[in-house]
Image (cartoon, rainbow, N blue to C red):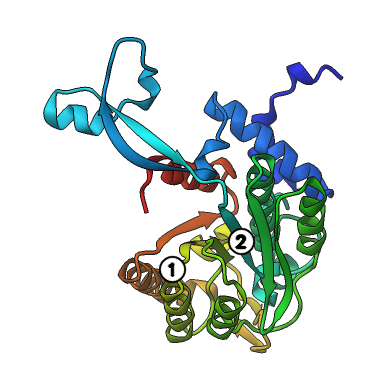
Amino acid sequence: MDTDAVDYRRYLDPATLARITSLDLRARLIVEGLVSGMHRSPYQGISVEFAQHRQYVAGDDIRHVDWKVYGKTDKVYLKQYLQETNLQLICVVDASQSMGFGTVGRGGIASVQETSVGPGWSKYDHATAVATALSYLAISQQDAAGVAIFDDQLRRYCRPGNSPGHWKAVVHELQMQPRRSKTDMGRILEQLGQTVSHRSLIVILSDFFDDLTSIARGLSFLSYKKHEIIALQVLDPAEIEFPFEDVQMFQGLEETGELLIDPRSVRAGYLQELTRATEQLKRTCRGLGIDCERVNTSQGLDIPLRNLLTRRASGVK
């Protein structure tokens, strides 16, 4: 195969990635697709932070022009960056039962029971794909990457490292499948804050289906420890849109039993409650200075990755 002819950007599509079983191959293809789509290396986005401005002089690279400053002052200034050589990335991945839900790559919406198990692209698949790609980017530039996997307990913790062999260890841990367990995020985040001593960039990938008071307590503890935190709320399109029409048995995904429901009678209330819970999570994060973004598992992985890398490269917190 002529690899130069491969359009790697198609591997940013979840439905395509669902047909690739190897997690390390998924990550490599995602990164190649991201680089191809951005037309420049995104590696600097992880470990380069804004330091100061300086005035433009002839011959400078215009890619570093701060156009916002130009728009306000009519003067051309460049952004200068400070290289961090000791960045430590930790991806915290929710592996509770609700993360095993997925309807992407199945050719349509089936029943709730059918979509909660079996082949396809689940929320956990999406979360691990993002986590492995970020880890690959970090380790490729000699930064350290680690991973924590939890449900009602901290099931796995792979300490950050920066060797190629360490990335294989990260991939190995992320191949763990979600259990039939509830989430206890607040307690887990507090435990993680006590475990991680080095100031880190912590990316949390979860549906955040847990008590918000508990979540806020855990986030507050990590923030108190001076970690930089990014929260990515990973949701399936069926959870966002609730497209179900027929009366059917809905199965609780975290030991909450079953309930026969006419979806049309509860759709409005469900969507209202989802919006309320999501907005409350975002307000909590904003109050702590934490970036929070919803991730739709039917959309390309370039969206959360591009946003995260751009945020890091621009110095936006």
| Residue drawn at (75%, 44%) of the image | 26
Residue 213: x %, y % from top left? 42, 85
The residue that disc 2 covers is: 90
Question: Label 2 amino acid?
Answer: Ile
Quadrant position of the N terminus in the picture: top right
Question: Label 1 amino acid?
Answer: Lys
* Label 1: which secondary element: loop
Judge from the rendering whether residue 116 lies leftward or rightward of residue 265; answer left or right: right
Determine which quarter of the picture holds residue 237.
bottom right
Residue 122: x %, y % from top left? 69, 60
Residue 315: x %, y % from top left? 38, 45
Judge from the rendering whether residue 122 lies leftward or rightward of residue 175; answer left or right: left
Disc sitting over residue 89 in the figure: none
Viewer-nearest of discs 1 and 2: 1
The residue that disc 1 covers is: 226
| Residue placed most toward the observer, 42 or 22 | 42
Q: CA distance from mark 1 to mark 2?
A: 14 Å
Confirm whether residue 22 shows in the render: yes
Q: From the viewer's perspective, is residue 236 above or below residue 49? A: below
Q: Earlier in the sequence, mark 1 or mark 2?
A: 2
Residue 176: x %, y % from top left? 80, 67
Quadrant position of the C terminus in the picture: bottom left
